[in-house]
């Protein structure tokens, strides 16, 4: 692995003989570094430079010392580029020398978007201890499960002792509640050692409500033209925007270069409003990939606008990202399973035809805001599918997971559908063993702000019929209560209680990795359709080698030949049953599946998914998959 060509231009950087400090502060005419070395506190005037930059080199300063910046003689402030905040968001930063860590991953080549299987987790609730170090003990389990990368929800420093991570304010500092910077490095190094990549969730669309000091340094950090759901957007495209853009670019490069992170998931890119000729998302993606040297990294966006251009190569008019969260799949499946129709679910039909259409196209078949539709040239891997994620679980009043609302038979069918589809699957922590614990929204803000957060959380659900009564809204767990956080921690005993579900996930992920058809994700060699209101069929092939998933969400049904006529005329004695979710090893007591080869019909048990394999030339089908996609 070649060394990164990126270096930090701001903050506190260890150099021969001392530490160099650099900061952008348009609000100040004079800036000092306040250095805290043990019991000794010294102040060092910084030299003003061009574009409101201030710099100095302090001889004798070293890693482990703490520091603040003083603007025009006022009280010291945390550095926006601080690499560690051992005393929290309001305390001084600690000088960190990233070069002092000894890596052992020299042979690690990075993470490819192809064959990616993502496991999303929250460091604080994945293990009882909730630390980077504790997470290392889970890596062998996760690798054995069959995922290829873990995705850490944001780890940047947040207020208080517990937080989802999306209230980050010190974007370069790993949360001190999870461990020190080198603890995160040890986690990444250990992940690479067992063959797992590490993706990090990062937030550039807003800062948290407490401890954000950017505006104290420069009013130009925030836009006077663009508003987001969290207030003024960052100034990506206005006057004096260079160092605002550089903050995000440096942050992306910092995680990739100094922590060997293999990919970034960009939160809510639709709220990163930028009218520049080159969008900030494209610029930081290109910079991050350069910072990786010859190591392959992936960049994935969360963006609800159905913009396939975001994940197309620049030469095709795109922004060069590797993936986008495609929530349509989740929404359609959730509506089918739970009959949810409130809030944003109201625009989703939840029919088997709707689900098949999303599998076939990646997004719902509608015109996106950028006017471009997915086509067979777009790899299936760019669409990240899930049936659970932190948003879709944690933003529910009681943090209930989809399997808390339905029986496990239907959950197994939905899981098989997710892991058979050619798109990139994302598994949310505990999903693979049907975790009994919820994942709730939790925070730890000061009392006054905390009351507003609690009230706001409960008001969010006032429009839901079940919470018309204010007394019912009071039953929603208080995000400020520590018990809410503790209730969200996984129970490791669930792995034994629901061992059958866990075995199903391991088996399906093994097939996805090793099967010659399922290991190649191409929309052009996928045909998804709904032969009935309770069944989704997916046909995938590679040459003359074929795999078929029949997912029955309803009652036992006799499937006539015409239901499977799009797949080589339907089942016969060449079809081999590879897997049925009704098998005993997966914890089910379902009925047996029966094929009448002569009649080319099938008796499909209730709430069962089955995978078949067969070989042969099917070019005689009346309609090709490409035609069906148009």
Image: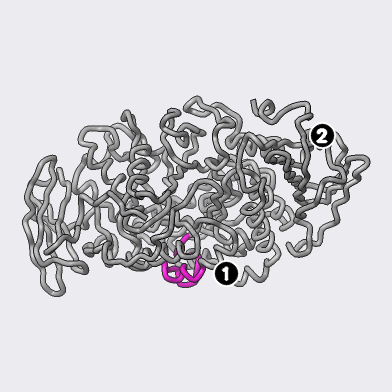
Q: Residues within 10 Å of mark 1 (few under 14, many from 20)?
A: some
Secondary structure under the numbered disc 1 in the rendered image: loop
Q: How is the image coloured?
A: one colour
Q: Is residue 396 visible?
A: no
**Disc 1 versus disc 2: nearer the observer:** 2
Based on the picture, tell me whether residue 128 belongs to the magenta stretch.
Answer: yes
In this picture, residue 92 sits left or right of residue 586: left
- Segment tinted magenta in the rendering: 122-138
Residue 197 point in image, percent of width and height: 47, 57
Counting residues from the start of the chain, the first of labels 1 and 2 encountered is 1
- Cα distance, mark 1 to mark 2? 46 Å
Residue drawn at x 14%, y 44% as measured from the top left: 27
In this picture, residue 545 sits left or right of residue 296: right
Based on the picture, tell me whether residue 403 belongs to the magenta stretch.
Answer: no
Q: Residue 491, labelled with which disc?
A: 1
Residue on which disc 2 sits: 565
Residue drawn at x 89%, y 40% as measured from the top left: 600
Front residue (pair 253, 338) = 253
Residue 437 point in image, percent of width and height: 58, 64
In this picture, residue 205 sits left or right of residue 481: left
Image quarter in which the N terminus is found? bottom left
């Amino acid at each position: 692995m070649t060394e990164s060509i990126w270096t930090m231009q701001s903050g506190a950087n260890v150099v021969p003989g001392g530490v160099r400090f650099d900061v952008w502060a348009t609000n100040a005419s004079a800036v000092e570094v306040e250095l805290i070395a043990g019991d000794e506190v010294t102040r060092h005037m910084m030299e003003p430079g061009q574009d409101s930059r201030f710099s100095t080199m302090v001889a004798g300063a070293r890693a482990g010392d703490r520091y603040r910046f003083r603007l025009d003689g006022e009280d010291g402030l945390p550095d926006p580029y601080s690499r560690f905040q051992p005393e929290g968001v309001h305390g001084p930063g600690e000088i960190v020398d990233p070069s002092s860590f000894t890596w052992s991953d020299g042979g690690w080549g990075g993470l490819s978007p192809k064959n990616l299987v993502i496991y999303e987790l929250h460091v604080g609730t994945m293990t009882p201890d909730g630390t980077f170090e504790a997470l290392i003990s889970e890596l062998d389990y996760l690798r054995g499960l069959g995922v290829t990368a873990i995705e850490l929800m944001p780890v940047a420093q947040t207020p208080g002792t517990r937080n989802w991570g999306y209230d980050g304010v010190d974007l370069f500092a790993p949360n001190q509640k999870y461990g020190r910077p080198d603890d995160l490095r040890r986690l990444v190094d250990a992940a690479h050692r067992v063959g797992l990549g590490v993706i990090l969730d990062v937030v550039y669309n807003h800062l948290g409500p407490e401890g954000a000091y950017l505006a104290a340094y420069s009013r130009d950090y925030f836009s006077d033209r663009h508003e987001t759901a969290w207030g003024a957007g960052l100034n990506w495209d206005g006057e004096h925007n260079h160092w605002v853009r550089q903050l995000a670019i440096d942050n992306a490069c910092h995680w990739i270069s100094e922590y060997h992170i293999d990919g970034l998931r960009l939160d809510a890119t639709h709220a990163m409003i930028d009218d520049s000729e080159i969008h900030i998302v494209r610029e930081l993606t290109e910079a991050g990939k350069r910072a990786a040297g010859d190591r392959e990294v992936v960049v994935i966006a969360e963006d609800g606008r159905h913009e396939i251009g975001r994940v197309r190569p620049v030469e095709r008019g795109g922004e060069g990202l590797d993936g986008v969260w495609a929530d349509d799949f989740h929404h359609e499946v959730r509506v089918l399973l739970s009959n949810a129709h409130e809030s944003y679910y109201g625009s989703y039909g939840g029919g088997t035809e709707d689900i098949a259409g999303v599998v076939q196209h990646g997004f719902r078949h509608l015109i996106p805001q950028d006017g471009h539709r997915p086509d067979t040239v777009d790899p299936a891997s760019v669409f990240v599918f899930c049936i659970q994620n932190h948003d879709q679980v944690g933003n529910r009043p009681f943090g209930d997971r989809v399997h808390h609302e339905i029986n496990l038979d239907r959950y197994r069918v939905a899981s098989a559908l997710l892991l058979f589809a050619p798109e990139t699957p994302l598994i949310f922590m505990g999903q693979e063993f049907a975790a009994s614990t919820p994942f709730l929204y939790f925070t730890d803000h000061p009392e006054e702000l905390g009351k507003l957060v609690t009230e706001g959380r409960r008001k969010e659900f006032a429009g839901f019929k079940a919470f018309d009564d204010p007394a019912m809204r009071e039953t929603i767990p208080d995000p400020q209560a520590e018990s809410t956080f503790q209730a969200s921690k996984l129970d490791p005993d669930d792995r034994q209680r629901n061992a059958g579900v866990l075995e199903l996930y391991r088996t399906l992920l093994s097939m996805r990795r090793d099967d010659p058809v399922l290991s190649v994700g191409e929309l052009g060699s996928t045909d998804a359709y709904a032969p009935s209101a309770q069944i989704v069929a997916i046909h995938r092939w590679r040459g003359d080698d074929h795999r078929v998933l029949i997912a029955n969400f309803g009652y036992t049904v006799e499937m006539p030949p015409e239901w499977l006529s799009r797949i080589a005329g339907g089942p016969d004695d060449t079809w081999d049953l590879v897997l049925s979710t009704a098998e005993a090893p997966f914890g089910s007591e379902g009925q047996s599946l029966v094929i009448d080869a002569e009649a080319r019909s099938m008796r499909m048990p209730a709430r069962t998914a089955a995978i078949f394999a067969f070989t042969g030339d099917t070019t005689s089908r009346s309609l090709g998959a490409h035609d069906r996609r148009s």
